[in-house]
Amino acid sequence: MRLGFHLPIAGGLLQAVAVARSLGLECLQIFAGNPRSWSQRPLDEALAREFGRQAGQAGLHPVSVHAPYLINLASPQEDLWQRSVAGLAGQLRRAKALGAQAVVVHPGSRGDRSLAWGLERVAVGVAQALEQAGPGAACWLENTAGGGGQMGGTLSQLAWLLGRLRGQDVGVCLDTAHAYAAGYRLENQAAVGRFLDRVQALVGLERVGLWHFNDTPHVRGGHRDQHTHLGRGRLGRGAFGALLADGRLARAAAVMETPKDSRWSDRRNLAFLRRLQRQICNG
Ligand SMILES: [Zn+2]
Ligand SMILES: [Zn+2]
């Protein structure tokens, strides 16, 4: 399995590639702007091209752009929804300029509207954004912790969206912490095996463009979205060892979105997975 991180671009886009290279990463996720703001500074096109060139040279694949959190493709408020569609289109254009494969986006929150209404709303929003942006980068819908009006908590919702958007450049990103928060068992090999069976049956493993490997301190099914260091939460070696060992994910990619509370955090989390990979290889 190809492993990487979500890395900050505060030090510059090229710095993110340099850090990825120094850590020995095989894939990379970034924000292509301020994740908590509607106003996105224009991308320097020459710099974006250089980022794509260097990321390719460093063997980083896939490179994904995580959409800002303000985007809500399920919003019942017309103005917010329109802004979200335009915002996603902008992120898709940025991803293309950066040579990134896809934009990862959460389906959003439908408020007090029905699930069916929310699903249709998201599908129309994604379709419009892809049309506005033109071809070049895919849209990967990320599973969420679910609960309340939050969309994307179940595999069947993601499967419905993929079906509704058939023929378009749409895939899925699966986050382990979100899946556990939404109620899926993942804590051991048997549970991971059953989870992957369901992913295969509902979504298709080939439609999963990216995994997010995050541990979580919260109980299963609690709908709490908080990431912690791998091995320090409820998923631990049982979950990540099983995911790394399952042959169906041998060619998949996973980025960690783990806390960066010390300068060693990323090295420790990566070492956790590399150790498990070596144990699996040594049988
Ligand atoms: Zn996310
Ligand atoms: Zn995630």
Image (cartoon, rainbow, N blue to C red):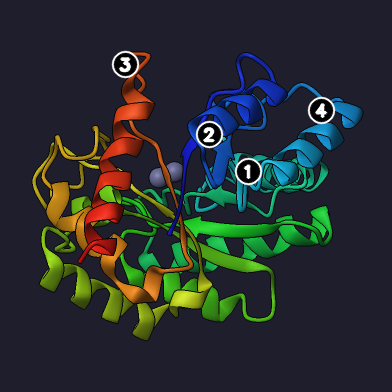
Q: Earlier in the sequence, mark 4 or mark 3?
A: 4
Alpha carbon distance from label 4 to label 3: 28 Å
Instruction: Name the residue beneath numbered marker 3.
Output: 261
Task: Work out which quarter of the rendered image holds the C terminus and state it.
Answer: bottom left
Q: Nearer the viewer, residue 109 or 279?
A: 279
Residue 145 can be seen, yes or no: no
Q: Amino acid at mark 1?
A: Ser
- The nearer-to-camera label among 3 and 2 is 3
Q: Position of residue 80 (x, y in %)?
A: 59, 39
Front-lying residue, 88 or 75: 88
Separation of residues labelled 1 and 4 (CA atoms): 19 Å
Classify residue 230 as left or right of residue 185: right
The amino acid sitting under disc 2 is Leu
Please rate how many residues cluster around mark 4, counting C-alpha atoms within 10 Å: few if below 14, some from 14 to 19, many from 20. few
Q: Quadrant of residue 94?
A: top right
In the image, the residue with mark 1 has its CB under 8 Å from the nearest atom of ligand 1: no
